[in-house]
């Protein structure tokens, strides 16, 4: 049973350790409302990717609870065929490593994989695949093999293979990693469009330039695998001390003519400069 | 505050001793590392060439892959049953005709088949041509053994010729199929013909990730080449091969786990569903009939020639 006010995702006291020894998440708790775009920020190894895999129901936490779409998500619950199909069709996960995600012999088969496993009728699958190929501007790659694609093209195929099932919640793990500036810009615009269409989006990143126009809210993770801040993006980007302490920005030394000066480097850099020049 | 950077002094000095200004060093060519890099590039080149041939607009490329698969299997069975060299030669000539009609480079096609027959089949059949193994009429005497002539016998040579022709024809048929059908379409044909889907999936993935892992190997080997200054000795070489094999195994394992998660995330639950496009054109049906008639003619003709 779901009420309109119930959050889409609800995470409480989540703990996870790889092999039971190497902690990746410690006492993590937050909620995400329908239609929100939330960024997970943290340095390398702070547990963002692990959290996304827990949210996607691919690994299961050692402690704490996780509810999605009004249902408790556990290993046991996902054994249920109907619940599994419902959960998987409403949640799309774009992996950081496109090579792991693009495993079929051709691009077309790759995109068709998801809807076919979710038992959509064949003709509908084919129509959707064609639509997504057009949306992501990769129609000319439809019959290519993955090894003939560039990193940017593979990322598009990976995103297409997730969008084709029309999930309401999208998880992106380091979406811009390894993409050239033009592909990054294209991806940003796509994410903004999906957000406008009412999709709920969670993205793990350490690329602060990605946040400003896109995510209204940030969850910050410390290198001790704990959630240390849950705040509006503007406030987070203004809090230089916090960002420095989380290793998300660094002290930067450079030269202006004869002067050498240091300042924190990150998106707030430009805001600081603007203030200084006033 | 970030701590003051402590760059070791030696890193700030130019390195002496390795003089790039003159070329009086010993030169080595054809190291194992270079060969490995070239070999890896060769695999990719060959795959691309096969794809390019399969995309040409020739006779066999236009046929439905399922029809080609059935016809190939039927013709293979015929080649296995036939016991006369002329009939096999006729079948072989047919594969050459089909290769030409499918716009394959015929010279290259012939070379590709015959290059490895002496290596594999020749070694196997050679002993059978001698009078020790196949007694009979000696046509090429090589000497005498306790008063009996020994050498190559007619029966032995016929048997060997038969096997060589059979192998050449069979390989030509399979090469024709694989060169005129792109890999994905061949996989689709296999699953359409009720080969278990999981098996097809595994074959498909093995081929797909071959390239990813080859990339990883090429990276490791190139990185080693970039750092190798002196001539490596055998011991270091073995250590490198062993450690990179280990690293590759680890990478493959991590990758396989992630692929499995990617499949689960999109609703895979152990029972695979695939796109089925069953449209057989009239030309495909006709081609299948022609192939089956050829099979009947080959086997029937062979029987008519007697044992």
Image: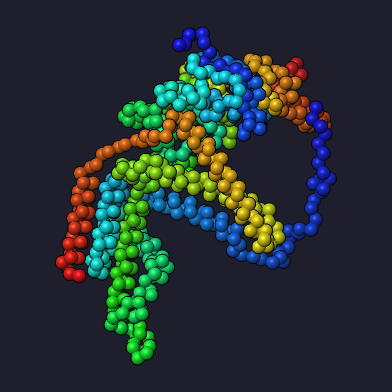
Q: Residue at x 52, y 10 (%)?
A: A6
Compare residues A126 and A130 and report the one nearer the observer.
A126
Relative to A150, is B145 on the left or the right?
Answer: left
Q: Point out residue A64 in the picture as x, y percentages from the top left corner.
A: 60, 20
Q: Residue at x 76, y 19 (%)?
A: A276
Does residue A252 appear anywhere in the picture?
Answer: yes
Name the quadrant of the C terminus of chain A: top right
Q: Point out residue A46 in the picture as x, y percentages from the top left corner.
A: 66, 28
Compare residues A181 and A93 and report the one nearer the observer.
A93
Q: Quadrant of residue B159?
A: bottom left
Q: Point out residue B22 in the picture as x, y percentages from the top left corner.
A: 73, 63
Q: Residue furthest bottom?
A: B147
Q: Point out residue A204 in the picture as x, y percentages from the top left corner.
A: 59, 26
Relative to A54, is A106 on the left or the right?
Answer: left
Name the quadrant of the N terminus of chain A: top left
Compare residues B286 and A55 and report the one nearer the observer.
A55
Q: How is the image coloured?
A: rainbow
Q: Residue at x 37, y 40 (%)?
A: B197
Relative to B12, is B297 above or below? below
Q: Residue at x 56, y 16 (%)?
A: A10
Relative to A113, is B282 on the left or the right?
Answer: left
Does residue A186 appear anywhere in the picture?
Answer: no
Q: Quadrant of residue A82?
A: top left
Compare residues B63 and B122 and report the one nearer the observer.
B122
The number of numbered badges drawn on the structure is 0
Q: Quadrant of residue B187?
A: top left
């Amino acid at each position: 049973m779901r009420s309109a006010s119930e959050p889409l995702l609800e995470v409480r006291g989540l703990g996870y350790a790889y092999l039971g020894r190497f902690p990746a998440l410690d006492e993590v708790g937050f909620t995400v409302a329908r239609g929100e775009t939330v960024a997970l920020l943290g340095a390398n190894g702070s547990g963002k990717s692990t959290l996304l895999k827990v949210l996607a129901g691919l690994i299961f936490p050692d402690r704490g609870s996780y509810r999605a779409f009004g249902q408790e998500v556990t290993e046991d619950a996902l054994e249920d065929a109907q619940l599994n199909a419902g959960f998987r069709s409403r949640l799309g996960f774009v992996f950081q490593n496109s090579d792991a995600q693009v495993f079929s012999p051709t691009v077309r088969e790759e995109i068709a994989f998801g809807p076919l496993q979710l038992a959509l009728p064949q003709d509908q699958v084919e129509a959707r695949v064609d639509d997504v190929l057009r949306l992501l501007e990769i129609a000319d790659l439809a019959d290519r093999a993955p090894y003939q694609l560039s990193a940017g093209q593979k990322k598009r195929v990976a995103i297409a293979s997730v969008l084709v099932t029309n999930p309401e919640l999208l998880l992106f793990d380091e979406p811009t990693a390894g993409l050239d500036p033009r592909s990054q810009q294209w991806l940003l615009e796509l994410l903004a469009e999906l957000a406008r269409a009412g999709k709920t989006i969670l993205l793990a990143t350490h690329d602060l330039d990605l946040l400003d126009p896109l995510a209204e809210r940030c969850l910050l993770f410390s290198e001790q695998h704990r959630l240390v801040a849950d705040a509006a993006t503007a406030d987070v980007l203004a809090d230089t001390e916090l960002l420095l302490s989380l290793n998300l920005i660094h002290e930067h030394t450079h030269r202006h003519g004869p002067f050498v000066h240091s300042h924190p480097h990150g998106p707030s850099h430009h805001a600081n400069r603007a203030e200084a020049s006033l | 505050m970030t701590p003051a950077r402590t760059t070791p002094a030696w890193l700030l000095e130019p390195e002496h001793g390795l003089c790039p200004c003159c070329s009086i060093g010993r030169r080595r060519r054809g190291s194992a590392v270079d060969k490995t890099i070239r070999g890896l590039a060769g695999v990719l080149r060959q795959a691309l060439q096969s794809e390019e041939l399969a995309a040409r607009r020739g006779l066999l490329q236009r046929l439905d892959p399922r029809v080609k698969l059935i016809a190939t299997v039927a013709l293979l069975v015929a080649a296995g049953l036939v016991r006369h060299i002329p009939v096999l030669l006729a079948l072989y000539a047919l594969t050459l005709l089909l290769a030409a009609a499918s716009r394959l480079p015929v010279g290259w096609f012939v070379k590709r088949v015959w290059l490895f027959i002496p290596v594999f089949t020749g070694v196997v059949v050679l002993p059978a041509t001698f009078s020790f193994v196949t007694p009979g009429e000696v046509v090429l005497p090589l000497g005498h053994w306790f008063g009996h002539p020994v050498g190559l016998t007619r029966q032995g040579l016929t048997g060997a010729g038969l096997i060589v022709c059979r192998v050449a024809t069979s390989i030509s048929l399979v090469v024709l199929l694989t060169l005129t059908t792109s890999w994905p379409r061949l996989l689709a044909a296999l699953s359409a013909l009720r080969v278990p889907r999981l098996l097809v999936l595994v074959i498909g993935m093995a081929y797909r990730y071959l390239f990813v892992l080859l990339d990883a190997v090429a990276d490791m080997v190139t990185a080693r080449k970039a750092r190798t200054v002196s001539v490596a000795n055998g011991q270091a070489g073995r250590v490198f091969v062993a450690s990179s094999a280990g690293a590759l195994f680890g990478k493959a394992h991590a990758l396989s786990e992630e692929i499995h998660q990617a499949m689960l995330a999109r609703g895979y639950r152990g029972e695979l569903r695939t796109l089925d496009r069953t449209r057989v054109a009239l030309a495909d049906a006709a081609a299948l009939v022609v192939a089956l008639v050829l099979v009947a003619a080959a086997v029937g003709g062979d029987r008519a020639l007697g044992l």
